[in-house]
Amino acid sequence: MTNKYSLISMHLQAIQKQVAWISFALWIVISLPSKIWAQEVIMQEKESVAKTEKKGSMYLYWGWNRSWYANSNLHFKGYDYDFNLKSVRATDRQSPFSTKVYLNPSNATIPQYNFRIGYFINSKYNISLGIDHMKYVVTQDQIVGIDGSINLPDSPYNGLYSGQNIALKEDFLKFEHTDGLNFVNVDIRRFYELWTTKKVTFNVMGGLGAGVMIPRTDATLLGKPRHDEFHLSGYGFSGVAGINASFWKYFFIQSEFKLGYISMPDILTTYDAADKADQRIMFSQFNVVFGGNIYL
């Protein structure tokens, strides 16, 4: 009996040892990879934060735009006239590409350009100040409706109007914001990181902005001398969305699409203080800009 119990005891001890070794092996198989994976996740998170943390950083960019305008009404008022032009068509004026124009710093303000400087208040949101230098050109010789009155000395356009059509000939009206339609605005923008590597990060962004209009208007109205000085003429609102590709964290290229509304109730036309123009415009804008990030 003693030998029998001794054999049973030996078998039980052997089984206990095997169970212990199997348990230990299972603990290694289950526990160790999970710890390694957890460490890798922590390292990746730290690396990701190091790449994308933008709080306190700044950026600036420069680029160019194309702009489109919805038809708008134009109201002109002075001592001897007060009339509205209805559904006036206008386009932008894109400078033909030339390295002397687009890449020469002394000619930087000739094309339609965008400049902006911004500051990240946290890793996702930034506030920025910029200028959208657009150009607005009323299409010459188009036929539009007219309401109102003109009563100038010896003008062929004198009369009362109520929905008649009129051609925008140069001796009647030439109207441009070509120096330009300047929208100085403040934006709040949000960046969202899509994908990142050590060298390239792709982001999407969107934001809302508001600002003031400071056009320099080239207007020849009813043969009067033009008054083309920069002037605070109104205000505007806009929304923007875009795609951003950053390289080595410090340089980026960005494409943007912007929609906006402009109200300008105080546009200079002639040197007579009583002569003013008033218009409201819906616009869209496509921009390609190049810039840099500054980590303070």
Image (cartoon, rainbow, N blue to C red):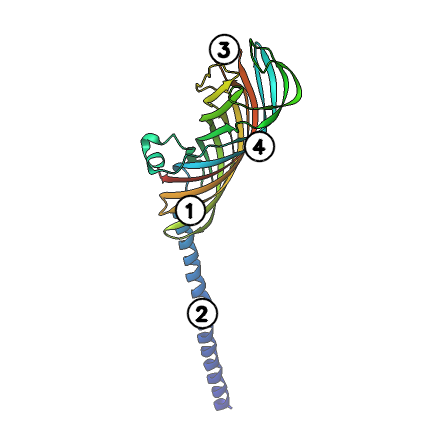
Are circles 3 and 2 on residues that touch, CB within 8 Å? no
Distance between mark 3 and mark 4 Cα atoms: 29 Å
In the displayed structure, 165 sits above or below 113; it is: above
Nearest the viewer among 46 and 62 is: 62
Badge 3 or badge 1: first in the primary sequence: 1
| Residue neighbourhood size for the residue with mark 1, other residues' Cα within 10 Å, grouped as few (<14), some (14–19), many (≥20) | some
> What type is the residue that disc 4 sits on?
Ala
In the displayed structure, 36 sits above or below 20; it is: above
* Mark closer to the observer (4, 2): 4
Badge 2 or badge 1: first in the primary sequence: 2
Distance between mark 2 and mark 1 Cα atoms: 42 Å
Distance between mark 1 and mark 4 Cα atoms: 31 Å
Which element carries disc 3, helix, strand or loop?
loop
At 59% from the left and 27% from the top, the residue drawn is 143
Rendering quarter of residue 216:
top left
At 45% from the left and 27% from the top, the residue drawn is 178
Badge 4 or badge 2: first in the primary sequence: 2
In the displayed structure, 145 sits above or below 199; it is: above
Residue under label 3? 272
* Mark closer to the observer (1, 4): 4
At 49% from the left and 29% from the top, the residue drawn is 136
Which element carries disc 1, helix, strand or loop?
strand
Q: Residue furthest right?
A: 162
Residue under label 4? 70
Q: Which label number is shown at residue 245? A: 1
